[in-house]
Amino acid sequence: MAAKLGRPLYTVACHDDLSAADLVGRHLIGDGETYWNDGPLTRAVREGAICYLDEVVEARKDTTVILHPLSDNRRILPIERTGETLHAPPEFMLVVSYNPGYQNLLKGMKPSTRQRFVALRFDYPKPEIETRIVAQETGVDTQLAAQLVKLANALRVLKEHDLEESASTRLLVYTATLMQDGFEPLAACRAALVEPLTDDPETVEALMEVVNTFFA
């Protein structure tokens, strides 16, 4: 989107230790003096850029609260330490993302934050598109890529029963890469597709039984 619109993009990978100062900015000491250094959120507001907060639910709630005046009709960013109040230009956009479903009460988005955004729900690509992705990213033939996609869809059915997370397109790419490099299909599936999904030995063996039906 940033490339198509010709806008600068600031990406922040959120985590437990992310503070409001990491986003807004802080005073630093250098050359015998104290100076203000904008954080990525502040720079994005000043430039009318796109600020993207990845896995926003990993950030502390007292950190994400600073987004509230910026993401509602006010579109302002108060900077208490400098006394500034920045007004976001029309070009500024704030984008957040997270994987729903596995968070507990401590790792969910506050309703007051979530309701300030319009939302898009993304699912796995359609089989024919996912097949093309795996083939183009790894160089395997289309038939093998389609077989891996069918396997992934069979494993994804188990997500609601035994797995916290299901087989992603990323794992299919890793698996196909190993196969392209000479790994036997069963070994590649175990190392790059099954073992990353669970630590439980019984569940691993159950998943490998599914793999065996595709790569016996």
Image (spheres, rainbow, N blue to C red):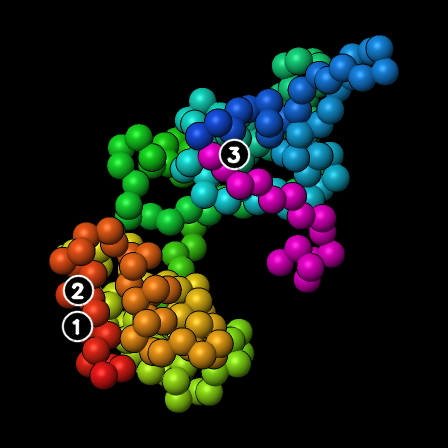
Left or right: where does residue 166 sit relative to residue 206? right
The label number, if any, that marks residue 72 in the structure image: 3
Is 12 magenta? The answer is: yes
Which of the 4 image quadrants contains residue 171? bottom left
- SS under mark 1: helix
Which kind of residue does numbered mark 2 sit on? Glu
Task: Quickly name the residue at label 1.
Answer: 209
Front of the two marks 3 and 1: 1
Task: Quickly name the residue at label 2.
Answer: 205
Provide residue 82's location: percent of width, then percent of height: 71, 14
Q: Are the residues at dot 1 and dot 2 in contact (C-beta closer than 8 Å)?
A: yes
Q: Is residue 133 shown to the viewer in this render?
A: no
Which kind of residue does numbered mark 3 sit on? Asp
What's the CA distance linking mark 1 and mark 2?
Answer: 6 Å
Seen from the viewer's position, the closer of residues 75 and 123 is 123
- SS under mark 2: helix
Is 61 magenta? The answer is: no
Which circle's residue, 3 or 2, is located before the other in the chain? 3
- SS under mark 3: loop
Which kind of residue does numbered mark 1 sit on? Glu
Residue at image coords 66%, 13%: 81
Seen from the viewer's position, the closer of residues 47 and 127 is 127
Q: Is residue 119 shown to the viewer in this render?
A: yes
Q: Within 10 Å of the Cα at label 2, are there few (<14), some (14-19), or many (20+) other Cα atoms?
A: some
Seen from the viewer's position, the closer of residues 135 and 71 is 135
Provide residue 180's location: percent of width, then percent of height: 47, 79
Judge whether 38 appears above or below 83 on screen: below
Range of magenta residues: 1-15
Q: Looking at the figure, which quarter contains the N terminus?
A: bottom right
Q: Within 10 Å of the Cα at label 1, are there few (<14), some (14-19), or many (20+) other Cα atoms?
A: few
Which circle's residue, 3 or 1, is located before the other in the chain? 3
Residue at image coords 40%, 76%: 183
